[in-house]
Image (cartoon, grey):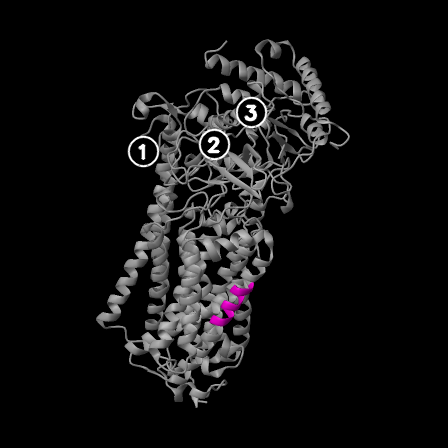
């Protein structure tokens, strides 16, 4: 295999106006996110679209999206360290950095949307170990430590020999983390839209797809602007993998809904999502299924178009869009459908019992969510400038032989 | 050599800070004598003697309150002596700047020292700092001897309350 | 149970009970026209913690006069200091009137729903900081000192019993601290119960001569509520979830 040693990684120059304005814009968005959160905290959540019925809104959508993408982003590193797919080895460092920054962005949104973000120390000091949320605090903070150690093992030549064990540990940790995130919803027995063990594997499958889609976009754009070589071999390898991940996420979605459809008690919520839920039904079929799953699979698998970088990028963008829509349907759609307090009865009250709850995202919420995305990208952009993260070349010769060969690769 | 010098300068700065801190506490002690140097909290609206001596209160009030809040809220222990409501009852004062002097509030009393020490308190984000009179408080006070008088107690106290309510509503 | 005890008989039993208690309550009670039941609701002596020997609960008669529920709700607002906002979607509601209609038979009922004070409360399980608590005597509360406002308890509650404080709060009652950014719900008037008083809603109903809500100790077989729930089949909302609510409903 081609020599992957310390000298093949190099910081990007990052002195041009393009880079500086990118950093500037990301900084503006991140600061706007913090500003939006400050506005929400001083005025109260009354300025958001959230209510006593839809208690988690767009900030949670972005936070959960970023957190599951974070764990997925680490996957490419695990592919080489844990599963011996050497073709991904050059991307190990980048995977770890992306995982760290996406998680940081997601946690920022999650924390800033709290009713009392000033009490974040309380969340650290007082813990109820029966709560999946409390476990997640450990899973998230532990993830930072585990991934930083893994990154160190990968970057310090003397410790390279430990990268397999650190990578294995990180892989187990990230599976636990995504299980924890999915279980936030899976453990809610009262909500007909949640309360299912499948939430955990569904989130894991989604994380694979989202993390890889973000990585593909990051690599193709960075390598284009830095004029470094990116060979088809690695790109196509990632393309095939992305297609499989989309199929896996789709598979779990199908099983989730089929299982619910079989249980008469869940008919209501299934009708709502699949048939007559208005915006949620449209988002499901058009956003999640067609644009987020089927179109990208065609783009990635159809032999007439799947050799172009544009197709792969478009598919990645659609996967990200579809992922956001899917998280939106899970979080907001799951709350919009009323609690079944009296099954078989029509229910009404001043507290909107029994009726579908309305939710319109407000500007501060969206700005906060985008602020988290900007923060994640800002950390990535700074990391590739100040640390030797990105390989000088990802040309076919540089990445070495693929362990999985496909027709196009030959 | 440079290292040594920087350690030295840190030590000098630290001792200067400690001296300054000493001055502050000295200033605090002279408050009772009317010094203008430190915070000068108002005298209690009622009573001459707090639940503990003044110096203990100044040092420990936050721990007392925090300890008791957990006992009261989480365990349901009522009637212990470090009660925030009681702080408000005695230390709330009227000021022409607040609601035209029509209400008694404890906030200026707390703010006097807390501003000086730059310690933000969270109590009155939720608790009222306004003294509201004694009727309800007395009703809700635990009785000294509660054994086997529960039902009678409830009836007597509840009756008193209803009587007062009716009176307030203009019925007889 | 109901099979062997016809409803009429049971009602008569309760009436007898009412007379007995009235007599025990003394002349003043009769004179002022106040009906008050202290049975089981004793003031806990100073310095003693709540005990699991008691299990506070309520029995709500869904066949009561619907105006009773307005009485109960306004008493709660007055006592705890909530209500009066202009944003129905975000204003807290500690107790609300819920109307249900059987889709196939058309039968209807209206009754109040508030925190059901579950024995296995999902809100307590999910709370990351331990701010959601169940007291030894079964009352479920939010410790607002350590509530971070994550709203996970609201996601977990099967009864939509909790509200998030979306706006700044002023003029709180001394016994009921409330603050923006934290979650709140019915406290079963814990401050009154600890002092041996009835919850405000029950008290207000009793004052107008209604027995629509009975409050008391479910662990004490002699309490009025225990006798009532053993005389009639009562239901608790979503009993199938196994959360064991402390609030019983009669007539649904």
Give residue B57's mark: 2
Image mark 2: chain: B
In this view, the residue in front, A35 or B123, is A35
Label 1 and label 3: CA atoms lie apart by: 66 Å
From the image, which quarter does the C terminus of chain C lie in?
top right
Label 3, residues with CA under 10 Å away: few <14, some 14-19, many ≥20: few
Look at the numbered disc 1 and give the secondary structure of its residue.
Answer: loop
Residue C4 image offset from top left, x and y in percent? 77, 30
Residue A308 image offset from top left, x and y in percent? 35, 81
On screen, residue A267 above or below B109: below
Give residue B37's mark: 1
Q: Are marks 3 and 2 in contact (CB under 8 Å)?
A: no
On screen, residue A332 above or below A409: above
Residue C127 image offset from top left, x and y in percent? 54, 47
Q: Which residues are magenta?
A: A246-255
Q: Kindly indicate whether the residues beneath marks 3 and 2 are on one polypeptide chain.
A: no
Label 1 or label 3, whichever lies nearer to me, is: 3
Magenta span includes A251: yes
Residue in view at x 53 percent, y 25 percent: C68
Look at the numbered disc 2 and give the secondary structure of its residue.
Answer: helix
| Residue behind mark 3 | C65
Label 1, residues with CA under 10 Å away: few <14, some 14-19, many ≥20: few
In this view, the residue in front, A31 or C56, is C56
A15 with respect to A49 (left or right):
left
Look at the numbered disc 3 and give the secondary structure of its residue.
Answer: loop
Label 1 or label 2, whichever lies nearer to me, is: 2
Give residue A4's mark: none
User: Is residue A224 something one can see in this rendering?
Assistant: yes
């Amino acid at each position: 295999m081609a020599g992957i040693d310390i000298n093949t990684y190099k910081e990007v120059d990052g002195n041009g106006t393009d880079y500086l304005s990118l950093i500037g814009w990301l900084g503006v968005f991140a600061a706007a996110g913090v500003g939006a959160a400050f506005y929400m905290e001083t005025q109260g959540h009354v300025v958001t679209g959230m209510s006593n019925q839809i208690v988690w809104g767009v900030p949670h959508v972005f936070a959960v999206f970023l957190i599951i993408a974070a764990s997925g982003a680490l996957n490419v590193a695990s592919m080489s360290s844990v599963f011996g797919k050497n073709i991904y080895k050059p991307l190990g460092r980048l995977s770890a950095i992306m995982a760290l920054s996406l998680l940081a962005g997601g946690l920022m949104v999650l924390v800033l949307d709290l009713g009392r973000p000033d009490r974040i120390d309380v969340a650290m000091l007082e813990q109820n170990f029966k709560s999946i949320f409390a476990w997640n605090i450990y899973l998230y903070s532990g993830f930072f430590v585990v991934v930083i150690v893994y990154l160190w093992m990968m970057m310090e030549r003397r410790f390279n020999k430990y990268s397999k064990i650190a990578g294995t540990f990180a892989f187990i940790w990230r599976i636990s983390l995504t299980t924890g995130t999915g279980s936030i919803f899976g453990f809610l027995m009262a909500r007909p839209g949640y309360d299912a063990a499948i939430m955990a594997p569904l989130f894991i499958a989604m994380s694979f797809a989202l993390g890889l889609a973000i990585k593909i976009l990051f690599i193709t754009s960075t390598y284009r602007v830095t004029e470094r070589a990116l060979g088809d071999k690695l790109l196509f390898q990632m393309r095939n993998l992305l297609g499989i991940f989309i199929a896996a996420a789709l598979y779990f979605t199908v099983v989730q809904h089929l299982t619910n459809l079989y249980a008469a008690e869940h008919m209501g919520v299934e009708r709502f999502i699949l048939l007559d839920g208005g915006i949620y039904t449209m988002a499901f079929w058009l956003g999640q299924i067609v644009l987020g799953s089927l179109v990208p699979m065609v783009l990635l698998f159809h032999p007439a178009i799947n050799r172009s970088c544009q197709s792969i990028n478009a598919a990645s963008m659609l996967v990200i869009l579809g992922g956001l829509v899917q998280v939106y349907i899970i979080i907001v759609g799951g709350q919009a459908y009323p609690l079944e307090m009296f099954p078989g009865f029509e229910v009404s009250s001043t507290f909107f019992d029994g009726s579908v709850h309305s939710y319109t995202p407000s500007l501060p919420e969206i700005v906060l969510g985008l602020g988290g995305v900007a923060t994640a990208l800002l950390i990535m952009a700074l990391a590739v400038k100040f640390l030797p993260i990105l390989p000088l070349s990802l040309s076919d010769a540089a990445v070495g032989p693929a362990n999985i060969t496909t027709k196009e690769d030959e | 050599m440079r290292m040594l010098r920087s350690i030295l300068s840190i030590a000098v700065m630290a001792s200067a800070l400690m001296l300054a801190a000493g001055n502050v506490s000295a200033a605090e002690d002279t408050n009772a004598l009317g010094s203008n140097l430190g915070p000068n909290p108002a005298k209690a609206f009622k009573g001459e003697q707090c639940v503990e001596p003044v110096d203990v209160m100044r040092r420990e009030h936050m721990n007392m309150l925090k300890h008791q809040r957990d006992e009261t809220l989480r365990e349901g222990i009522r009637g212990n002596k470090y009660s925030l409501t009681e702080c408000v009852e005695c230390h709330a004062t009227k000021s022409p700047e607040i609601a035209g002097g029509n209400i008694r509030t404890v906030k200026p009393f707390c703010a006097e020292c807390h501003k000086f020490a730059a310690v933000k308190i969270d109590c009155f984000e939720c608790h009222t700092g306004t003294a509201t009179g004694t009727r309800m408080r007395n009703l809700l006070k635990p009785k000294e001897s509660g054994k086997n008088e529960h039902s009678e107690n409830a009836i007597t106290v509840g009756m008193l309350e209803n009587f007062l309510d009716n009176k307030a509503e203009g019925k007889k | 149970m109901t099979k062997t005890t016809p409803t009429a008989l049971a009602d008569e039993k309760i009436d007898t009970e009412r007379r007995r208690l009235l007599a025990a309550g003394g002349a003043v009670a009769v004179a002022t026209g106040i009906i008050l039941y202290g049975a089981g609701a004793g003031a806990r002596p100073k310095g003693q913690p709540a005990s699991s020997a008691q299990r506070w609960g309520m029995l709500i008669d869904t066949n009561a006069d619907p105006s009773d529920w307005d009485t109960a709700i306004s008493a709660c607002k007055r006592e705890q200091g909530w209500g009066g906002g202009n944003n129905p979607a975000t204003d807290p509601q500690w107790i609300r009137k819920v109307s249900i209609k059987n889709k196939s038979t058309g039968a209807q009922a209206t009754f109040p729903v508030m925190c059901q004070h579950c024995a296995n409360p999902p809100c307590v399980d999910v709370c990351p900081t331990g701010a959601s608590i169940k007291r030894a005597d079964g009352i479920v509360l939010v410790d607002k000192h350590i509530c971070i406002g994550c709203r996970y308890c609201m996601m977990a509650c099967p009864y939509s019993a909790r509200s998030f404080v979306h706006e700044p709060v002023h003029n709180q009652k001394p016994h009921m601290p409330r603050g923006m950014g934290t979650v709140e719900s019915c406290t079963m008037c814990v401050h009154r119960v600890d002092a041996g008083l009835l919850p405000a809603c029950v008290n207000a109903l009793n004052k107008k001569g209604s027995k629509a809500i009975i409050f008391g100790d479910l662990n004490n077989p002699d309490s009025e509520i225990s006798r009532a729930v053993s005389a009639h089949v009562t239901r608790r909302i979503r009993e199938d979830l196994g959360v064991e609510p402390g609030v019983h409903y009669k007539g649904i």
